[in-house]
Image: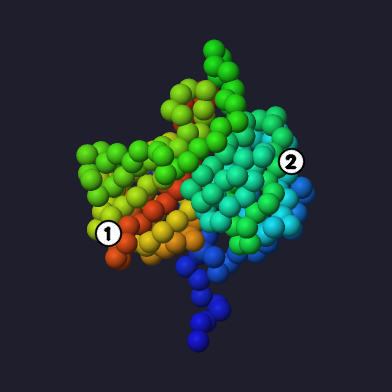
Amino acid sequence: MEISALTRSVVKRNHALICPDGHVNSVIPGWTNCTVHVLINEQMGARLCQTLITLNPESIVSGKTAASQIFFYVIEGHCTANGTVLFAGQYIYFPPGEEYQIVQASTGAQLLTFHKVYEPLDGYSTPGILFGDSAKIPGPAFLGDPALRLQVLLPEDLSFDMAVNIFTYDPGGHLPFVETHIMEHGLLYLQGQGVYMLDHQWYPVKKGDAIWMAPYCQQWFTAMGKEPAVYIYYKNVNRFPTAI
Ligand code: UGY
Ligand code: MN
């Protein structure tokens, strides 16, 4: 029998692991007939928001982006976003001030969102709405290791202040060193399993788990099991690092 008083989820000062067993629904105005789990937000100390939305044919996810841009990624099933049909692995990015509407979803379709307040940059215009397909994004070896592949889903130009990447690790593949960096991450496992080291604590992780890493949360991962481990993650990029 499962013991309901146990979970792998933790919420710490500079990182969190949120596993599906702890999910509780939120009601979001404008997002109707769907189930929403807010996995990461500023209440934790984060400067991004990450949600997981489960849809059905009656679902409507609509609104207008305000200060924050929103990135939607289809994890499973299909839906129609601003008139374009999106299948698993496809995504749409909305900059601030844009109306979005997601309808006609398949039963059980799942969407991941990343939200970040947009920081304009002198000399660069705000990006436009962007559709993409992860199947068409190349996945070169990461730092020369063919066991790790990194796909970069958003253009790497300075008008963007956030990156969304998909990282694939063959079993046994691992980050080449413990990362210690200013950038923050929000992450969702799409496949497989492994062990994450966060701030010198070790966590077994698997498909469906979400992780928040604050700036300077030390991080390392190794993939285990019989299939590649895959996660999609957010990173703030391309802006001046300090107000000092
Ligand atoms: O982009 C990154 O910082 C990435 N290598 N971090 C991570 O996967 N934890
Ligand atoms: Mn990192």
| Residue located beneath label 1 in the image | 171
Q: Which image quadrant for residue 222?
A: bottom left
Mark sitting earlier along the chain (1/2):
2
Q: Do the CB atoms of the residues marked 1 and 2 lie less than 8 Å apart?
A: no
> Which residue is rendered at x = 54% and y = 12% of the image?
123
Where residue 134 sits, quadrant-wise, is: top left
Q: Position of residue 41 (x, y in %)?
A: 61, 48
Q: Residue at x 59, y 22 (%)?
A: 126
Q: Position of residue 77 (x, y in %)?
A: 56, 56
Q: Residue type at mark 1?
A: Pro
Q: Residue at x 40, y 38 (%)?
A: 137
Q: Which mark is residue 184?
A: none
Residue at x 69% of width, y 49% of height:
103
Element type at marker 2? strand
Q: Report the front residue among 128 and 181.
A: 128
Q: Is mark 2 within 8 Å of ligand 1?
A: no
Left or right: 174 in relation to 49: left
Q: Which residue is mark 2?
A: 63
Callout 1: 10 Å neighbours few (<14), some, many (20+)?
some
User: Residue 229 placed where, x, y %?
Assistant: 36, 57
Q: CA distance from mark 1 to mark 2?
A: 41 Å
Looking at the rendered structure, the secondary structure element under dot 1 is loop
Mark 1 residue CB less than 8 A from any atom of ligand 1: no
Q: Look at the image and tell me whether residue 242 can be seen.
A: no
